[in-house]
Image: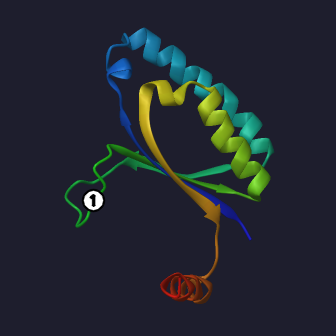
Amino acid sequence: MAHYLAELYTPKPAWLDLSDAERQEFLAAIGSAMPILASLGVEALALGKVDQTKLHAAPQTFFAVWRCPDDAALDALVSGIAQSGWHDYFETINAGGEATDLVGHIAQLGEAAQR
């Protein structure tokens, strides 16, 4: 079963203090690492700004959803993000793990209630 990572993130003051050129340099370095992740089967499924008009919207500014073929690729993604210096510039919350279908998730929810 595939593994997924959902990220929610907001720029820190350190990001806002960078010049445009410094931001572009950092983002170019992030972009240059993408082929390595792609070779592991990591896919960026969706990236964007959080729509604050939606009910129960997260307070973070941006989101990213990634698909990975296995736990090792998910670990490589999370490690690569950390090694890039991303967390110096963005306050990030991660939710990741192995996916299941609706029936499997309903079972997980039921098991959580038994604890």
Residue 51 quadrant? bottom left
Question: In the image, what residue occupies the spot 67% across and 37% down?
Answer: 79
List x then y, in percent, for residue 44: 59, 49
Does residue 75 appear to the left or right of 11 in the view shown? right
Mark 1 Cα within 10 Å, few/some/many (few <14, many 20+)? few
List x then y, in percent, for residue 26: 53, 19
Q: Which residue is mark 1?
A: 57
Question: In the image, what residue occupies the spot 79% across and 46% down?
Answer: 40
Residue 106 position (above or below residue 11) = below
Quadrant, the N terminus:
bottom right
Residue 2 quadrant? bottom right
Q: How is the image coloured?
A: rainbow
Q: Foreground residue, 70 or 88?
A: 88
Residue lying furthest front in this view? 115
Residue 32 quadrant? top right
Type of amino acid under label 1: Ala
Does residue 86 appear to the left or right of 76 in the view shown? left
Residue 41 position (above or below residue 102) = above
Residue 59 position (above or below residue 17) = below
Does residue 76 appear to the left or right of 56 in the view shown? right
Question: In the image, what residue occupies the spot 32% across and 20% down?
Answer: 16
List x then y, in percent, for residue 110: 52, 89
Question: In the image, what residue occupies the spot 73% across and 42% down?
Answer: 76
Q: Foreground residue, 70 or 49?
A: 70
State how many labels appear. 1
Label 1 sits on a secondary structure element that is loop
Does residue 101 appear to the left or right of 14 in the view shown? right
